[in-house]
Every structure is written in structure tokens, then in C-alpha cells.
Image (tube, coloured by chain):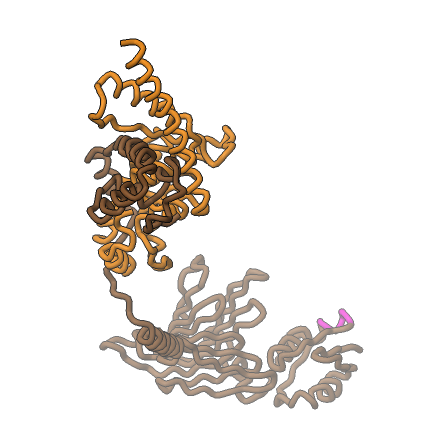
Chain colours: A orange, B brown
């Protein structure tokens, strides 16, 4: 992520630990958008996301004296947010059994390319989208953190609480699968280009 | 999983490897000049990698995720809730050594204040043992002669306020000095368990034992205030005796020979036609022991005598000789029998 070890974050963190409310507001304003987006990938319950963000910052404030300075404030907040959200989700859905840690990770791609014509682009986006939806949650989360949050494998591992190797594998498999889908699609485009026109 | 920044490191890479490579991903996303140069060189030196690189770059450039920006009111509401629950303490924390010092200073202050307050409120007690009388001179020069086996209590600032107050259990003779406080006679109040005696300047005897209270006024004037408030106040004239008991219920006021009730001051027992029962109670009162009459007919035995109170040890012989009875002692109990 871009502001890993960001010196402004570190200065603000020290101020925050001595009880500077402005520093807390700074962290809130800096990360609320990312956290909100991240949260939406796990649940569509926006109130739950709001609650989780509130709890996160309130906890941060009340425990500030016992916290050590994290290497990256952003990663720290992401990880803490993720844990809190999972706990809330498990409580609210405790009747449904969670097979893996979670099943739902909802990502959408933004339509933005101009290499091919509109019709082809639409088809391609739809295919890519549906391919993406078929990926396991952990793979989706890993590529989301990779390409949306620009997290390194180490950072993804830190946030998701797994090994760097596992994160790499998740990203690798997800991209590999998406590529296959696209290759098939492109082959189909060529096929149509030569034989149907 | 770190980027191989040497060309040779990428020789074994296929499309999927490029896709998952961080240095490659960064190049596709940011197209930084130094990375540009590196990847161009790789493709020039190894043209067979051009295909996989282009394919991987094409896919990565399409991977853009939709952003959901929360609206302003939502963010403001979240912050307001956080703000409410994160109180800011403006009190500067005192550094540790000072904190300790401050705590110690506070503790000393509290102890000092507490001790002072305690000293101020702590009562002065005068207790007499069995067979012992005591003369207590109060700060206002009033005099209390405390009979044996009795307790007197008064505050160290006795006489400083509007009233002079003291508490008695047992028996005492009071000679009260007349004092004024704020231009008015300063009342002298003797609290006994059942009643209070209000005095200005006078001499009287208070007996408050075994649920019987007896006040004998020698001279002056006193007012009796009953604790339960039922009886109303009583004024005593010199020579008056007021006796008040609850078990059994008794209240009488009559003229008496006051000296008889003050004889204990000379350590004398004065009995005039008293029952042995009464004598036994008097002995109990004075010596703080228990007297038991073994034979019921003994209690109606009449006694008239004036004797100097002997010490505890010679009491037995005196009693047995004077009354012609057998006296045995069992610890703190005297057994009288024929």
C-alpha cells in the first residue's frame, strides 16, 4: 500500500496516543472510505459496516495507551476492521454455519477499456465479472486488496491473517483462472471474426 | 515473491507468473520510467516473452474494481457516534515521580486531618472500678464525684459551646459551677440512659443503674428531661428525689434525706431499714460484683447500718459477722446463705 510506513501517519499516531482527538479524526477521515468499501465486499448490510467502523475507532481510542505503533496504520486498521466485522457477522448469522471463514466476497469490475468495440467489451466484462464471482472468497479478497488497495503480499497476509505464500497462491490462482476465461473469450472473438463475418 | 529485478530472473515466467508478480503489477499500474525501461529490455532480449507480457498486462489493466463512496451524511453520522464515545481528557498527566510525591502528600494530609478531627471528637472517659471512687474536676471547675463501677464521658471541648454536656452510667454526684455563655446561664446537661438532667448551678446526685435512674437534688434547681419524651419535663426542688424506672414502670418524686443518697462519697453505706435485697444491690453497684441470696427468706431480712465501705477482700467477713450469715465467694459472685 502506498502509505506503508508513512511518516505523517506515525506522527499522527504519537499524537493520537497522547489523547489528541484531532489525530483520531485524521485517521478516520483518511481511512473511512477504504474501510467502507472493504466492508461492502463482505456484506451488503451497510448499518453493520457503520457499526463496525464506529466500534473500531472507539476501541482504538479507549485502548490507545496500550497500543504500540503499527508498521502501517492502514494495515493495522484493515486487519482490526476485518476481525471486528467477522465477529459481528458471525453473531448476526450464528444460525447459519460458516463453512470457511466467510463465503461472501463481492467485487465488481469497473467498465473501462477502449481497446475493443462496445459490444465485445460488454460481453468481455460480463464474462470476466461472472468468472470473478466464481472465485473463492479468499482469492477474491486477495486480488481486491492487491489491485484495489495496492497491498503487497506481505500486507495482504498481515490483513487476512495468513502466510505470504498463501496470499501469493490465492492471487496467482485467481488471475490464472481469469486469464483462462479471457483466452477462451478472445479465441471465441477471433473465431467469430473469421468464420461468422 | 519479491520482484526479480534482473532480466534472468524472469526467464522461466509464463503469463500466470507475470500476472502474480508484484514488480510486473506495479509497472502495469503506474508505468514508472525505470520499470518501463526494465520491461522493454526484457522483451528486446527475450522476444519470446513479449506474448505472455502483453497478455498479462492486458488482463491486469482491466482489473479495476468499482468504488462505493459512502455519502457525506453517512460519514458524518459515523463520526458523530465515535465522537460521542471518545471523551477527551484535558487533564495533563503528571509525570510519575511527582505523582508518587503528590499521593504521599495527600495521604499525609488526610491522616493529619483525620487524626485532628478524631482528637477533636474523641471523648474523655473516666471509669471507676469496683470499690473505687473518683473525683473529676471539669474544665468549668464543676466537680464530679464518680461512684465505684461507673463511667463518665465528656468532650474535650467541654464548656466551649452553648451547653456543658456529659454522659453518665453508674452513679455520680455533681457540684455544678454557674457559668454564663453569651450573656445567658450556660446549661449543664447530664445525660443518663433514660433521662437528662438540666442544671444551671447546683449540687445533685445521679444514679443510673439496672434500669433505674434516681436524681437527688441537694441545692439549686434542675430540670429533668425524659429521653422517651412521654413524661414531659420535671422541675426538682432542693431535697427532691426523682426515681424513674422502666422495668418495672416507676416514676416517683418525693422529698428525701439527701445525705443518705450521697453517703457513698464518704465511702459509706447507709442503710435504714432496708431489705437485704436492697443491700445486696448496693453491694453489687459499688463493687461491680454479683450478689446472690441463696435462701428466699433472706431477701426480706431488714438491715439498718452505717458502715465504711471495706475493701473487697474484707467484705466477706464483715457481711458474715454483721448479718450472721455464711458468705462464700465464687469468682465474681458472692453467695449469701443462712
Q: Is residue A59 visible?
A: no
In the picture, measured across the screen, residue A122 lies left or right of residue B176, that is left
Q: Which of B291 and B128 is in front in this view?
A: B128
Q: Position of residue B2 (x, y in %)?
A: 37, 50
In the picture, measured across the screen, residue B144 lies left or right of residue A129, that is right
Task: Tell me which residue sits at (30%, 13%) in the image.
Answer: A194
Where's the C terminus of chain B, which quadrant?
A: bottom right
Examine the image and state in which quarter residue A111 appears.
top left
Task: Tell me which residue sits at (30%, 48%) in the image.
Answer: A74
In the picture, measured across the screen, residue A157 lies left or right of residue B273, that is left
Q: Which of B244 and A33 is in front in this view?
A: A33
Examine the image and state in which quarter residue B298 appears.
bottom right
Q: Is residue B30 visible?
A: yes
Q: Position of residue B90 (x, y in %)?
A: 23, 60
Q: Which of A171 and A51 is in front in this view?
A: A171
**Magenta span main SS:** helix
Magenta range is B295-299
Outermost residue toward the top?
A: A196
Q: Position of residue B335 (x, y in %)?
A: 75, 77
Examine the image and state in which quarter residue A53 appears.
top left
**Vertical placement of residue A67 versus B59, above or below:** below
Amino acid at each position: 500500500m502506498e502509505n506503508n510506513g508513512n511518516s505523517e501517519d506515525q506522527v499522527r499516531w504519537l499524537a493520537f496516543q497522547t489523547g489528541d482527538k484531532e489525530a483520531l479524526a485524521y485517521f478516520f477521515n483518511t481511512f473511512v472510505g477504504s474501510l467502507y468499501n472493504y466492508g461492502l465486499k463482505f456484506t451488503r448490510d451497510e448499518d453493520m459496516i457503520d457499526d463496525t467502523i464506529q466500534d473500531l475507532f472507539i476501541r482504538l481510542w479507549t485502548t490507545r495507551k496500550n497500543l504500540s505503533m503499527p508498521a502501517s496504520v492502514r494495515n493495522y486498521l484493515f486487519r482490526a476492521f476485518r476481525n471486528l466485522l467477522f465477529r459481528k457477522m458471525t453473531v448476526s448469522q450464528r444460525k447459519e454455519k460458516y463453512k470457511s471463514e466467510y463465503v461472501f466476497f463481492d467485487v465488481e469490475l469497473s467498465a473501462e477499456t477502449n481497446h475493443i468495440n462496445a459490444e465485445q467489451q460488454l460481453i468481455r466484462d460480463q464474462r470476466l465479472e461472472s468468472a470473478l464471482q466464481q472465485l473463492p472468497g479468499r482469492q477474491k479478497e486477495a486480488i481486491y486488496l492487491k489491485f484495489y488497495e495496492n497491498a503487497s503480499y506481505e500486507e495482504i497476509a498481515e490483513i487476512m491473517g495468513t502466510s505470504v505464500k498463501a496470499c501469493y497462491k490465492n492471487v496467482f490462482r485467481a488471475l490464472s483462472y481469469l486469464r483462462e476465461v479471457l483466452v477462451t473469450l478472445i479465441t471465441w472473438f477471433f473465431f467469430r471474426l473469421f468464420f461468422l463475418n | 515473491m519479491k520482484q526479480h529485478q534482473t532480466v534472468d530472473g524472469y526467464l522461466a515466467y509464463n503469463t500466470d507468473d507475470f500476472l502474480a508478480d508484484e514488480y510486473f503489477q506495479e509497472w502495469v499500474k503506474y508505468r514508472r520510467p525505470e520499470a518501463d525501461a526494465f520491461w522493454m529490455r526484457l522483451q528486446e532480449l527475450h522476444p519470446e516473452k513479449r506474448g505472455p507480457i502483453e497478455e498479462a498486462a492486458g488482463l491486469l489493466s482491466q482489473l479495476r474494481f468499482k468504488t462505493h463512496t459512502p455519502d457525506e451524511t453517512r460519514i458524518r453520522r459515523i463520526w458523530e457516534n465515535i465522537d460521542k464515545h471518545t471523551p477527551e481528557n484535558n487533564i495533563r498527566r503528571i509525570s510519575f515521580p511527582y505523582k508518587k510525591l503528590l499521593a504521599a502528600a495527600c495521604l499525609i494530609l488526610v491522616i493529619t486531618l483525620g487524626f485532628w478531627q478524631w482528637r477533636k471528637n474523641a471523648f474523655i472517659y473516666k471509669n471507676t472500678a469496683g470499690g473505687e471512687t473518683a473525683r473529676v474536676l471539669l474544665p468549668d471547675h464543676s466537680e464530679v464525684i464518680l461512684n465505684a463501677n461507673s463511667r463518665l464521658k465528656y468532650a474535650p471541648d467541654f464548656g466551649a459551646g452553648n451547653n456543658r454536656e456529659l454522659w453518665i452510667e453508674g452513679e455520680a454526684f455533681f457540684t455544678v459551677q454557674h457559668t454564663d455563655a453569651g450573656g445567658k446561664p450556660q446549661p449543664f446537661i447530664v445525660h443518663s440512659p433514660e433521662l437528662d438532667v438540666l442544671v444551671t448551678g447546683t449540687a445533685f446526685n445521679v444514679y443510673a443503674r439496672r434500669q433505674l435512674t434516681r436524681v437527688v437534688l441537694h441545692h439549686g434547681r434542675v430540670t429533668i428531661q425524659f429521653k422517651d419524651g412521654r413524661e414531659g419535663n420535671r422541675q426538682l426542688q432542693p431535697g427532691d428525689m426523682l426515681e424513674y424506672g422502666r422495668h418495672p414502670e416507676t416514676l416517683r418524686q418525693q422529698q428525701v434525706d439527701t445525705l443518705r443518697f450521697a453517703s457513698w462519697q464518704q465511702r459509706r453505706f447507709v442503710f435504714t431499714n432496708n431489705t437485704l435485697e436492697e443491700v445486696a444491690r448496693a453491694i453489687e453497684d459499688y463493687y461491680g460484683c454479683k450478689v446472690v441470696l441463696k435462701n428466699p427468706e433472706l431477701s426480706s431480712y431488714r438491715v439498718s447500718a452505717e458502715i465504711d465501705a471495706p475493701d473487697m477482700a474484707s467484705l466477706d467477713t464483715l457481711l458474715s459477722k454483721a448479718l450472721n450469715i455464711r458468705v462464700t465467694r465464687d469468682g465474681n459472685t458472692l453467695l449469701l446463705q443462712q
